[in-house]
Amino acid sequence: MFDTHCHLNFEAFKSTFEDVISRARHEGVSKMLIPGTDLETSKRAFDIAETHQNIYASVGIHPTKDLGKLNLDSVMFKLEELAHSDKVVAIGEVGLDYYWFRSSPDVQKVFFKSQIKLALKLGKSLIIHNRHAGEDVISSLQNVWHKALGKRSVFHCCEVDSNMLLFAKNNGIFIGVDGDVTYDKAKQKFIKEVPLEQIVIETDSPYILPEPYRSQSSLPKGDSKDQMLNEPKNVKLIIEAVAKLKKVTPKELEKITTDNGKTLFGLN
């Protein structure tokens, strides 16, 4: 199994990430991708990937950061430095977020497009975040799209959006499926429309607990000992849910999505 998006670089896992990795290995998770969301977490993802076999990193600036306080040229230079490592396989998590609105849409678009161009320049994959900004995400991608990003990009935790799905189908973009598929009826209906060859599995740990754990715990908000955090080991619960929706066996879906993850991040 391949958890294509888990934030083991976050504070929530600071003292436990080695145990989290061990539990994932025990459950059959053979590969993991740790995405950066700012310079600090990108460096942390890089450090973990460099010292652990079959764990990879991506580096990037998340759209919910206060982008107006950042020097774009300086940030891009530092991201590029990190991205020269073979263990850094993607630029991300990058995109647009119109839910939190910590930065204006125009500023977000500048950072997004700059990071898309960095992925193209370095031959890296692209991890795309979208929240309530689907139309502008598509427009931004269209402005700088290159066929090199086909089969090397993913809509992380893709929203239920028919236009996003159509764009993904037309351009070979993978759809990231998370724990909400175990309980969200709209997401389940949406995933039925996604071709098997475009599905990758991601936990988004420590967030988006799948069932049955979701019903047993409040949603994680940080490094609190009385809260249950999502972990990469829970990939199997997502696989089981998606397999049922797609009418294949969990074993079949495990192979398909693991192979898809390898293709996405150029690990074949």
Image (cartoon, rainbow, N blue to C red):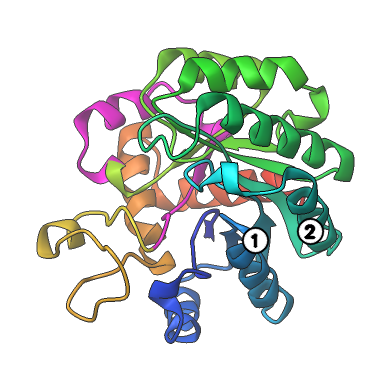
Bounds of the magenta segment: 181-205
Q: Is residue 68 left or right of residue 266?
A: left
Indicate which disc residue 139 carries: none
> Residue at coordinates 24% horizontally, 26% vertically from top-left?
186
Magenta run includes residue 77: no
Image height check: is 79 above or below 117? below
- Where residue 37 appears, as percent x and y from the top left, is 56, 54
Image height check: is 186 above or below 88? above
Looking at the image, the residue that sits furthest to the front is 69
Between 141 and 232, the one lying in front of the other is 141
> Residue at coordinates 47% horizontally, 21% vertically from top-left?
134
Residue type at tag 1: Leu
* Residue 267 visible within the image: no
Of labels 1 and 2, earlier in sequence is 1
Question: Residue tagged by mark 2?
Answer: 78
- Label 1 and label 2: CA atoms lie apart by 8 Å
* Residue 223 visible within the image: yes
Magenta run includes residue 189: yes
Element on which disc 1 rests: helix
- Where residue 81 appears, as percent x and y from the top left, is 84, 60
Crowd band around label 2 with a 10 angstrom C-alpha radius: few (<14), some (14–19), many (20+): some
* Number of marks in the rendered image: 2
Residue type at tag 2: Lys
> Residue at coordinates 35% horizontally, 51% vertically from top-left?
238
Between 107 and 221, the one lying in front of the other is 107
> Residue at coordinates 50% horizontally, 76% vertically from top-left?
25
Image height check: is 141 above or below 237? above
